[in-house]
Every structure is written in structure tokens, then in C-alpha cells.
Amino acid sequence: MPIELFNQKGHQCLMFTDLCDEAGDVVQSNQFLIVDGDTGAIIDPGGNVAYGELYLAMTRFFPPQQLSAIFASHADPDIIASLDRWTTTTPSAKIYISRIWERFIPHFCKPGKTTGRVIGIPDAGLRITVGRSELIALPAHFMHSEGNFQFYDVTSRILFSGDLGASLVTGEAAKKPVTSLAGHVQHMEAFHRRYMVSNKILKMWAQMVRRLPIDMIVPQHGAPMKGAAVQEFIAWIEQLPCGVDLLTERDYAVPA
């Protein structure tokens, strides 16, 4: 069952947390459905391991074949490896992804299936209409992908943050929003130190998002953050050394 993140005046945001077989070697990941009136869009639809369950679960809330857009924060397989199947399911949906990946994602599909459907998001970001509402593609480059975007839903004031804010928990645990960062950092710290490129970009990201009214930060892995945890996370990530900040010559030595 999906988690309802927001539902007011015909605008609905749903999160699916447990569609992958966690008993196997599959990383937990979240998929998202946004419905505004008679318009539907998915964010980070996931890999083939999630496709069947996501399709079936979605039918209760919106006809999958009528989706108007597929949003991909970046081009990792857990984000969009199921694209070949979604391009068949949704014959007219546009595919939004960073322009540096737009010529790579056809490799996920049979020849010709993405022709005329891919919209490359410029580095500066983009405002995208979804029904009567709007998503803002926010620059999130090198967190962790070179071309990376987060999606801010203006109506719900939810920031779908991709890998930033990820926590390594089960799909069941991911259903419960975190309201305080205390006790939650232990599920986040190692991931962010490894997958975020540098503290420099984290500081610039924090400066950018403080200009937005954010009620919830919802990552592509793990639990959403809301209430006090939103600003606590921004303050925490702003000070975190990570990526190249931590590397030394010992990390670039010929193996013995």
C-alpha cells in the first residue's frame, strides 16, 4: 500500500516504499505518483524489479496509461531502468531528465521508443506544469550524479530530493516520517559521506532551499522528513564533510 503524503483539493502525492524484494540483493527505493485533477505523473519510477507492483498499485489511484510525465532525478538503474516498460505503458508521456543524460537513457529502451519524448532539463532547472499545479526541477548537481535534479511540488510544499536525505532502512520503516533528526543520522551519515561529492555543493544547496517553504523532504531511499527534521537536516548536511573532502593519496594507491 502506498503512503499518502498529501491530499487536498484534487492534488495528491503518493509514495511507494516496499515494491522491491528486500530479501534479495536489491536496494530499497521509493517511487512517487503525483495526481492533480485528471493529470498524473511519476517521479523516479525505479527498475524492473519495481515495475509490476508499481503498475498494479497505481491503478487504484490513476490509470497508468494516461500518465503525462515521467520525471527522473538522474539516470541510475534504481531510478529509471524500467523506462522501456513505461514507454510502452504510457504512449504519450514526456520524459524529463537532465540534458546531460538525455542521450544516454535510450540505452534503457528498444530503438525508437524515446524518440521525441525526452525533455532535457537545463542545468539551471525548469518549472513544469502538472495539471493545475507546478513542479520545480531544482539543481542538485553532484548530489550524487553529475546531472541531477530534485523536484519541488509547489502545491504540497514537498521536496522530492532524490539521493540527498537518503536513509538506509527497510521499506516498512520508510513508511514512517521522521520528525526529529536525533536517532536518524545513524541511518544517513555513511551514505552521505560516500555519495555526496563535496561539502561545497552541500552548502550551496542549503542556501538555495532555505528560500523555499518546505513542509517535507522525501528522498528516493528511506524515510521522509517533516516538521523540525526538515530544517535540522538542512543544517546538518550544510556542515557535513564528504566525498573528495575525505580522500587522500592512500585512496589512490596501486593495490598490493
Image (cartoon, rainbow, N blue to C red):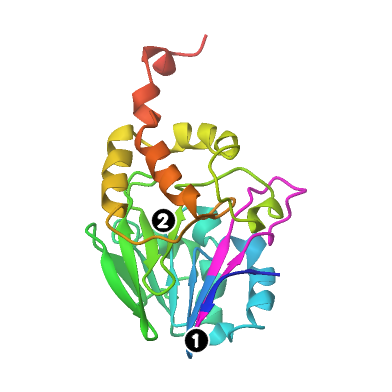
For marks 1 and 2, the one nearer the N-term is 1
Prevailing secondary structure class for the magenta stretch in the rendered image: loop
Q: Image point 38% across, 21% down: which residue?
A: 247
Looking at this view, is 59 or 167 the one in front?
A: 167
Note whether 117 is above or below 175 in the view shown. Answer: below
Mark 1, other Cα within 10 Å: few <14 / some 14–19 / many ≥20 = few
Residue 161, position in %: x, y? 43, 55
Magenta region: which residues?
Answer: 8-32
Residue 65, position in %: x, y? 55, 85
Residue marked by disc 2 = 74
Q: Image point 31% across, 71% down: which residue?
A: 119
State the mark number for residue 10.
1
Q: Report the amino acid beneath label 2.
A: His
> Visible in this render: residue 144?
no
Note whether 178 is above or below 251 in the view shown. Answer: below
Q: Image point 77% across, 48% down: which residue?
A: 23
Q: Report the amino acid beneath label 1.
A: Gly
Label 1 or label 2, whichever lies nearer to me, is 1
User: Does the magenta run of residues contain 88?
Assistant: no
Which element carries disc 1, helix, strand or loop?
Answer: loop
User: Of all residues shown, which one is farthest toward the top?
Assistant: 256
User: Does the magenta run of residues contain 24?
Assistant: yes
Q: Image point 67% across, 49% down: which residue?
A: 26
In-image side of 135 versus 54 (left or right): left
Which element carries disc 2, helix, strand or loop?
Answer: loop
Looking at this view, is 154 or 117 the one in front?
A: 154
